[in-house]
Image: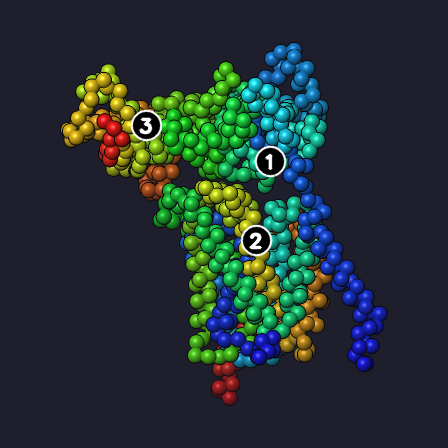
């Protein structure tokens, strides 16, 4: 009885009320209900397109539009134009006649810090801009040539809302136009671009491996050279092919589809590529080799004062297509062996051209520097100051072993 | 049915599990980029040496505790050093554990603020976490032991989940294997204080363990071996996946390692959020253990009957200090302070105490 009375004293009651109050207050603040934001209250950004701000000065019409796409700033200059492709969450009505209605819209702003432009764009957007589903960042050649890639990418690397696997593209033309593109498939433009780059394993002309924000960040952090897929936009059609090559942070030039193919042979990143070669018996016709397994090993060697690299490639695949008008005897081991030899020569020549091309440009996309440093650390210390002079002279010894495993469904 | 709450003793193997389950906490997340900026791609070697280094500290504490069976540091320290010096050493001991609780609270709530509750004030998360820790630490040791034994299951789950980082592994990032940066590797070792958090609680936990055929040094050693192996393999895979330079540039390297994973063919995304979920229970273990060790130590030192008296006493201090560390500069200052304090306690005070015990025993034998 006495203990029960003690428990009911004012201090004890006050303590209990305080504990209950703290518990309720803590639950209210940490359950996430008070700051929850529903899906329909967000504007999902799918593509961020960055252009040189000067492109808005092209015509009088564009100048008029541009006036709403900027803000007065006290310091700095208008370096870039940021355009965001935003998903329309409202149900889109068909235009009729099978024409797909746009599922996205684009807003733009000019300035220098990306974050400032994003916040100023809220003046054009009724909902907050949400970057969790950003699938592609398209940067124009003109923008990247201004101050390099690092200042452009900083916002996308620093903000925790961003993802590391967001795809990067460089376009020689206008990035905003790509953001405005409405794919014929009816899917949003960002999803479409993401799908294009995902096909890189089958398309030997597209360098899509290790070219997203995360890997480019690693390359920048390590002072390495890197390549980003090139995205052209001609006659309202986007087309992936080739790569933009960066030395440290500067755009040095482009690799065309042939050189890109050489890089992919070097890396071994394609999974189902096709390699056309001249028919050994009918040189005016072609035989297409379909690759389905590929292993490469790029190794540095130092012997005395001589540095060289070796590349061992092993390929396995099928005969994918023969354009010859005469039927070949596919049971003839000599013929199949001659095809294997021809594919090996083609690959070897392609890789050699690619290696020499990048040496001429002075870029080191396969990260030869890191390989020499990693495999020969003591020798590296002796040559690291002269590396830029040594690198263009390093020869590559290539060994290609091609196997034909199948010849297709029908001869 | 046995009253499990009333159980006050644990086996040597339970001691090994309990003492080492509190080592891995969210504290290691900000510390990773710090120590890898010194050790670079040889982080695995630095972590291996750090495992030996901190086990040495734990071993010295076990040796000290074995000189005074059934007594905590709060009981034998006044006899050993006198009242004033004993009080000072006891204060350092209490501070080391309180600092661990504060660092854990800062680490896990900073992480939650960035990735989960971006608009919730960090102080709110801190008080909620501390209330949950207080609730558990207020229980009897038997209950706390079982809570730890249940929550420690999150540790293998955390590690299995973290193993997904292997998907991005590239051996070239680890080369050269032969270290040419011995100074950096050694400099990285003390920064592992955040990797081995709260083992000082052994000085209170030892009397709670019954002596069996297996020595405490062995059971705790196995725990350290497992944790060190986790750290070494973790360092190899992290450096191999996102490179040492990138780790040095990101504040929460392990989380960013998870962020770089793309699981092909699945709809599960943003894996870093799941990682944070697994870090919560393992950090909670360390906080509860340290808080219990503080309260139990005070109880024995001041000869009280119940450790629960001391639990609310430290709550305001823990809350205000944790909330005050709300800028990167303050957090780094506090982390450096806690590192030096923990190292001073483990590698200066404990060896001196062991020396004094040895000398005292020697003179008693002569008598």
Task: Residue under label 1, please give it.
Answer: A131
Residue A270 % position (x, y)? 36, 33
Residue B121 % position (x, y)? 70, 49
Q: Is the Cβ of the residue at disc 1 closer than 8 Å to that at disc 2?
A: no
Residue A187 % position (x, y)? 54, 29
Task: Identify which residue is drawn at 68% across, 61% down.
Answer: B131
Answer with the quarter of the image where residue B308 lies: bottom right
Task: Identify which residue is drawn at 47% across, 72% down.
Answer: B13
- Per the image, label 3 sits on a secondary structure element best described as strand
The quadrant the C terminus of chain A occupies is top left
Please tell me whether mark 2 or mark 3 is closer to you in this view: 3
- Crowding at dot 2, Cα within 10 Å, few <14 / some 14-19 / many 20+, comes out as some
Task: Identify which residue is drawn at 71% across, 67% down.
Answer: B313
Q: Which label's residue is closer to the chain start, 1 or 3?
A: 1
Chain under numbered label 1: A
Return the residue nearer the eye: B289 or A269: A269
- Crowding at dot 1, Cα within 10 Å, few <14 / some 14-19 / many 20+, comes out as many
| Residue A224 showing in the rendered view | no
Count of marks placed on residues = 3
How far is disc 1 from disc 2 in space, using C-alphas? 22 Å
- The image's mark for residue B277 is 2
Task: Identify which residue is drawn at 45% across, 75% down.
Answer: B215
Chain under numbered label 3: A
Return the residue nearer the eye: A221 or B209: B209
In the rendered image, residues at marks 1 and 2 fall on the same chain: no
- The image's mark for residue A274 is 3
């Amino acid at each position: 009885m006495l203990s029960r009375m003690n428990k009911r004293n004012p201090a004890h009651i006050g303590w209990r009320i305080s504990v209950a109050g703290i518990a309720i207050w803590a639950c209210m603040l940490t359950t996430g209900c008070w700051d929850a934001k529903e899906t329909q209250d967000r504007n999902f950004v799918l593509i961020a397109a960055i252009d040189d701000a000067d492109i808005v000065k092209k015509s009088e019409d564009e100048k008029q539009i541009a006036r709403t796409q900027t803000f007065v700033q006290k310091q700095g200059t208008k370096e870039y134009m940021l355009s965001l492709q935003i998903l329309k969450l409202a149900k889109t009505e068909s235009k009729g006649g099978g024409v797909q209605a746009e599922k996205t819209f684009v807003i733009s702003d000019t300035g220098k810090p990306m974050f400032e432009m994003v916040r100023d764009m809220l003046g054009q957007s009724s909902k907050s801009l949400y970057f969790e589903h950003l699938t592609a960042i398209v940067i124009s050649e003109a923008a990247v040539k201004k101050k390099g890639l690092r200042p452009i990418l900083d916002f996308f690397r620093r903000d925790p809302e961003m993802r590391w696997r967001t795809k990067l593209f460089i376009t020689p033309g206008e990035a905003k136009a790509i953001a405005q593109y409405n794919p014929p498939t009816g899917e949003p433009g960002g999803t479409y671009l993401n799908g294009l780059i995902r096909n890189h394993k089958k398309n030997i002309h597209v360098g899509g491996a290790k070219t997203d924000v995360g890997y480019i960040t690693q390359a920048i952090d390590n002072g390495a050279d890197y390549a980003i897929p090139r995205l052209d936009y001609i006659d309202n059609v986007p087309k992936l092919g080739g790569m933009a090559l960066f030395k440290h942070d500067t755009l040095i030039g482009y690799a065309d589809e042939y050189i890109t193919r050489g890089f992919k042979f070097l890396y071994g990143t394609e999974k189902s590529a096709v390699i056309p070669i001249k028919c050994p018996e009918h040189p005016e016709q072609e035989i297409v080799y379909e690759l389905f397994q590929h292993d490469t090993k790029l190794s540095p060697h130092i012997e005395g004062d001589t540095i060289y690299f070796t590349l061992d490639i092993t390929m396995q695949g099928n005969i994918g297509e023969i354009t010859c008008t005469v039927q070949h005897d596919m049971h003839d081991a000599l013929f199949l062996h001659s095809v294997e030899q021809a594919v090996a020569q083609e690959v070897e020549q392609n890789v050699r051209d690619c290696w020499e091309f990048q040496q001429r440009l002075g870029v080191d996309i396969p990260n030869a520097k890191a390989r020499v440093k990693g495999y020969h650390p003591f020798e590296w210390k002796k040559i690291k100051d002269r590396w830029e002079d040594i690198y263009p002279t390093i020869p590559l010894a290539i060994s290609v072993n091609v196997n034909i495993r199948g010849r297709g469904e029908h001869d | 049915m046995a009253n499990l709450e009333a159980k006050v003793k644990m086996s040597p193997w339970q001691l090994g599990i309990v003492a080492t389950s509190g080592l891995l906490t969210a504290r290691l997340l900000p510390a990773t980029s710090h120590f890898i900026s010194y050790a670079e791609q040889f982080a695995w070697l630095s972590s291996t040496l750090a495992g030996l280094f901190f086990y040495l500290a734990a071993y010295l504490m076990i040796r000290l505790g074995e000189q005074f069976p059934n007594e905590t540091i709060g009981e034998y320290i006044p006899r050993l050093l006198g009242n004033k010096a004993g009080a000072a050493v006891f204060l350092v001991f209490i501070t080391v554990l309180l600092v661990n609780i504060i660092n854990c609270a800062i680490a896990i709530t900073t992480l939650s603020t960035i990735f989960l509750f971006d608009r919730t004030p960090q102080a709110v998360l801190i008080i909620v976490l501390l209330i949950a820790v207080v609730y558990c630490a207020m229980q009897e040791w038997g209950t706390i032991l079982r809570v730890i034994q249940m929550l420690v299951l999150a540790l293998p789950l955390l590690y299995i989940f973290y193993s997904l980082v292997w998907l991005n592994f590239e051996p070239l990032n680890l080369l050269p294997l032969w270290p040419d940066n011995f100074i950096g590797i050694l400099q990285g070792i003390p920064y592992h204080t955040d990797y081995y958090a709260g083992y000082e609680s052994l000085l209170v936990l030892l009397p709670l363990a019954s002596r069996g055929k297996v020595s405490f040094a062995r059971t705790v050693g196995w725990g350290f071996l497992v944790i060190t192996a986790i750290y070494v393999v973790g360092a190899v895979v992290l450096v191999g996946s996102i490179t040492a330079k990138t780790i040095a540039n990101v504040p929460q390297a392990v989380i960013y390692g998870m962020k770089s994973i793309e699981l092909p063919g699945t709809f599960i995304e943003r894996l870093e959020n799941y990682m944070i979920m697994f870090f919560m229970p393992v950090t909670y273990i360390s906080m509860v253990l340290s808080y219990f060790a503080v309260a139990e130590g005070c109880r024995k030192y001041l000869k009280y009957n119940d450790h629960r008296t001391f639990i609310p006493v430290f709550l305001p201090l823990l809350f205000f200090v944790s909330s005050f560390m709300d800028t990167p500069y303050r957090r780094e200052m506090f982390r450096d302070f806690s590192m030096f304090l923990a190292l001073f306690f483990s590698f200066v005070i404990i060896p001196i105490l062991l020396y004094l015990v040895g000398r005292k025993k020697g003179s008693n034998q002569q008598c």
